[in-house]
Image (cartoon, rainbow, N blue to C red):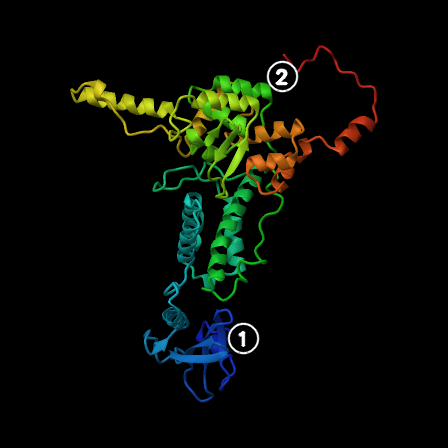
Amino acid sequence: MARIVSHAKLESPSARAKLKRGRQPHLQSLVTGKAALGYQRQADAPSGRWFVRRNIGGRYLVQNLGLADDDRHVAADGSAVLTFEQARARALEVLAQASGEDVPRGRLTVRKTCARYIEAMEQRGQRTLETERRFAALVLPELGDLEVRELTAERIRKWHAGLASRPALLRSSRDAKKRNTKAPPEDEEAVRRRRASANRVLTMLKAALNHAYDEQWVSNNEAWGRRVKPFRDVDAARVRYLQVVEAKRLINASPPGFRDLVQAALQTGARYSELCRLLVEDFNPDAGTIHVRRSKSGKGRHVILSDEGVAFFTQLTAGRPGDNWMLHNHGRVQRALARERERLENAGEPAAKANVNDRGEWRAAEQGRLMRDACEHGKIKPPISFHGLRHTWASLAAMAGVPLLVIAKNLGHTDTRMVEKHYGHMAPSYVADAIRAGAPKFGFKPDKKVVGLAAR
């Protein structure tokens, strides 16, 4: 079994000058248990030498790389005399040639590490758009050009804290300049949201750095490991959901096309992105299910529908080809046709020839403005996001006594932890029943003239 290589400080001539001279080499691991970058300097030598040491079947194979830049009168030339970075890069090239593996060449920067991580996500079939956007806007401008070996826990903590204190970014197209909102967070809820967002970006960065460590491109993960902690107690946001009467008002206030999307969300608890990808053939009227082919985690699931849900999707899909999008953004298609007719009329051509290459599928972020308008027209105060319709389905199901495990399965969670966190307090329980039955009563009698809006 290979011995663990102690991590010697070899990065600068001053650090190497403090090391013991002689035959004993000083090593930094390159591939755990298999290869290390070595440095050795004889007692009377003006400079040390670099070498790479490989463990092959329990035997060590040593290959010389060149002299170290210890002598300040001899500058590193990248060939005979090497800096630490040059020696490490050459050692990795030697390992790559020996093993045929795709080891990153040259300086392993955070930018290169993030790119390699996104490539790995694509190879696993995972969605990468959100990760790419967050890396580009929030990680790479500040950390992108730093070498992974240069990262320290203090540097990452400072960057993480800065994310939480800066204003949120406005949504923009992929290549547009990123813009902040007008003011940094001030109230307690705004601070909580920014810290929760900073935690999500930190998780993405750690995942990319851990990928580099797992692939053995870096020898240790001390800088971003246990020493860098996320903000605590920032994910427990109050779940906003609609009462049934509010949900009906929202449906009635939604324009055609978007109304179908809203009803589909309320009947399934599915995410917006999942609804956008549904095909007509994904509805099984015999089993009463909707097949979500790919969820947020990359896995599929079958959503069980109520009788009302089966009736809704039966009407929505009746007589339509199975390969059609189940839900259509008719508004965007109509607007595109109107612009094309106007263009043809201005060009002196018949408007009847207008045609657009748009299948009418719902696209990313198209629901936001329509949801805000529907909340305003339906008098939903405070307004709710489209994702709140998922919370609405889960909350109403929990209050109706549906077991949390069943809710978790329909929502696509692997266990009940997230469901218990957000909806557990709404479910009927022994504790709630016991308190309502046995808690002290003080003779309060409600005024019969006071009636809640939902009861009118």
Out of 427 and 377, give the one closest to the viewer: 427
Query: Mark 1: which secondary structure?
Result: loop
Extreme residue toward the left, this view: 348
From this viewpoint, is residue 373 visible? Answer: no
Out of 224 and 245, give the one closest to the viewer: 245
In this rendering, the answer to whether 46 lies above or below 394 is below
Out of 49 and 398, give the one closest to the viewer: 398
Out of 325 and 168, give the one closest to the viewer: 325
Which residue is at a point 46% across and 20% down the rendered structure image?
315
Q: Amino acid under label 1?
A: Ala
Per the rendering, the mark at residue 2 is 1
Q: Quadrant of the C terminus?
A: top right
Extreme residue toward the front, this view: 286
The local crowd at label 2, few if under 14, some if 14 to 19, many if 20 or more residues have their Cα within 10 Å, is: few
Q: Position of residue 285 (x, y in %)?
A: 50, 26
Per the rendering, the mark at residue 233 is none
The local crowd at label 1, few if under 14, some if 14 to 19, many if 20 or more residues have their Cα within 10 Å, is: few
In this rendering, the answer to whether 171 lies above or below 397 is below
Q: Are marks 2 and 1 in contact (CB under 8 Å)?
A: no
Q: Position of residue 447 (x, y in %)?
A: 74, 13
**Which of the two discs, 2 and 1, labels the residue nearer the N terminus?**
1
Q: CA distance from mark 2 to mark 1?
A: 71 Å
Q: Amino acid under label 2?
A: Ala
Q: Position of residue 215 (x, y in %)?
A: 46, 62
Extreme residue toward the top, this view: 449
Instruction: Identify residue for label 2.
Output: 454
> Which is in the foreground here, disc 2 or disc 1?
1
